[in-house]
């Protein structure tokens, strides 16, 4: 079964649920739910969170999530990590995740690398595409991975490990409700809520089309052939 790990109550799957065409389960380790075993997983999506990938002392379940990620990658089970989920993939494989580096917030463009243009996860995606960003931390690239996308502010936007594990820095899952919730996290962004929502609405049609394509690619180009 496709398993989705939600690390934070305010970082839900968003529009991913709207597009899913396969059975799935959502696991919420922040509330004490036990993580699935690797042999119960046909594919794994790990979502974002307000915590950092190295905040194991404050959020002990992160250690277990990283161990599960290592098992999933070793067994070549399809994996998709979004923002914190991408950072956890990098950290699980020995790369650094650095706080307050290459920060981005809002609706911003990302550009595919040459490798990204032929990667199955980005099949049908324009060379420059629309994303929503909300991160203070960023990942270094694990050894042996392939860089797939970059932006002006953050050169590490997406990477692939092996043939079936992807880490993203951007958020393809957000909705207006999610954006408003994240804006409320601190006063500076709360004062810019209208700006963030208006920018998102201007690009929403392209954004949702791209997000749907990502999930289609993950489900059909990666999971289905297995």
Image: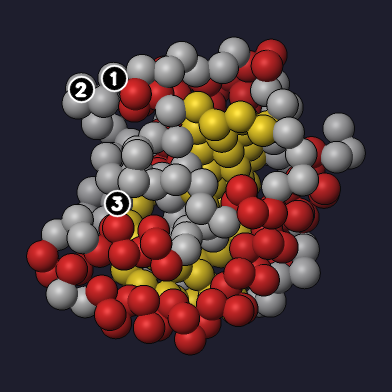
Q: Identify the element where label 3 is drawn.
A: loop
Q: Residues within 10 Å of mark 1 (few under 14, many from 20)?
A: few
Looking at the image, do the residues carrying marks 1 and 3 touch, with CB atoms under 8 Å apart?
Answer: no
**Where is residue 154 drawn, in percent x and y?**
39, 65
**Residue at 19% from the left image edge and 26% from the top image edge:** 58
Q: Residues within 10 Å of mark 3 (few under 14, many from 20)?
A: many
Query: Where is mark 3, residue-wise?
Result: 137
Total numbered labels: 3
Query: Where is mark 2, residue-wise?
Result: 57
- N-terminal of the pair, mark 1 or mark 3, is 1
**Residue at 38% from the left image edge and 83% from the top image edge:** 198
The C terminus - image quarter: top right
Instruction: Please identify the quarter of the rendering in which residue 111 is found.
Output: bottom right
The residue lying furthest to the left in this view is 187
Between 43 and 196, the one lying in front of the other is 196
Query: Where is mark 1, residue-wise?
Result: 60
- N-terminal of the pair, mark 2 or mark 3, is 2
Looking at the image, do the residues carrying marks 1 and 2 touch, with CB atoms under 8 Å apart?
Answer: yes
**Where is residue 67 drawn, in percent x and y?**
47, 19
**Residue at 52% from the left image edge and 57% from the top image edge:** 173
The Cα atoms of the two marked residues, 1 and 3, are separated by: 19 Å
Q: Is residue 156 visible?
A: no
**Residue at 72% from the left image edge and 26% from the top image edge:** 1
Between 16 and 38, the one lying in front of the other is 16
The residue lying furthest to the right in this view is 225
């Amino acid at each position: 079964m496709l398993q989705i790990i939600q690390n934070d109550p305010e970082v839900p799957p968003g529009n991913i649920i709207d597009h899913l065409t396969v059975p799935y389960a959502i696991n919420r380790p922040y509330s004490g739910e036990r993580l699935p075993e690797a042999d119960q997983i046909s594919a794994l999506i790990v979502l974002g969170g307000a915590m950092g990938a190295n905040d194991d002392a404050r959020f002990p379940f992160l250690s277990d999530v990283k161990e599960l990620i290592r098992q999933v990658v070793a067994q070549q089970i399809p994996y998709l990590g979004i923002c914190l989920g991408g950072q956890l993939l990098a950290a699980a494989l020995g790369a650094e995740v650095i706080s307050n580096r290459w920060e981005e917030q809002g609706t911003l463009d990302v550009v595919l690398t040459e490798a990204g243009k032929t990667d199955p996860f980005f099949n049908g995606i324009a060379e420059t595409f629309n994303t929503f960003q909300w991160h203070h931390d960023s990942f270094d690239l694990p050894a042996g991975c392939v860089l797939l996308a970059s932006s002006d502010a953050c050169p590490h936007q997406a990477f692939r490990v092996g043939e079936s594990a992807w880490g993203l820095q951007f958020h393809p899952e957000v909705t207006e409700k999610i954006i408003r919730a994240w804006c409320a996290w601190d006063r500076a962004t709360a004062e810019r809520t209208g700006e963030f929502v208006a920018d998102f609405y201007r690009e929403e049609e392209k954004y949702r089309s791209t997000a749907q394509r990502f999930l289609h690619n993950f489900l059909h180009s990666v999971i289905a052939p297995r």
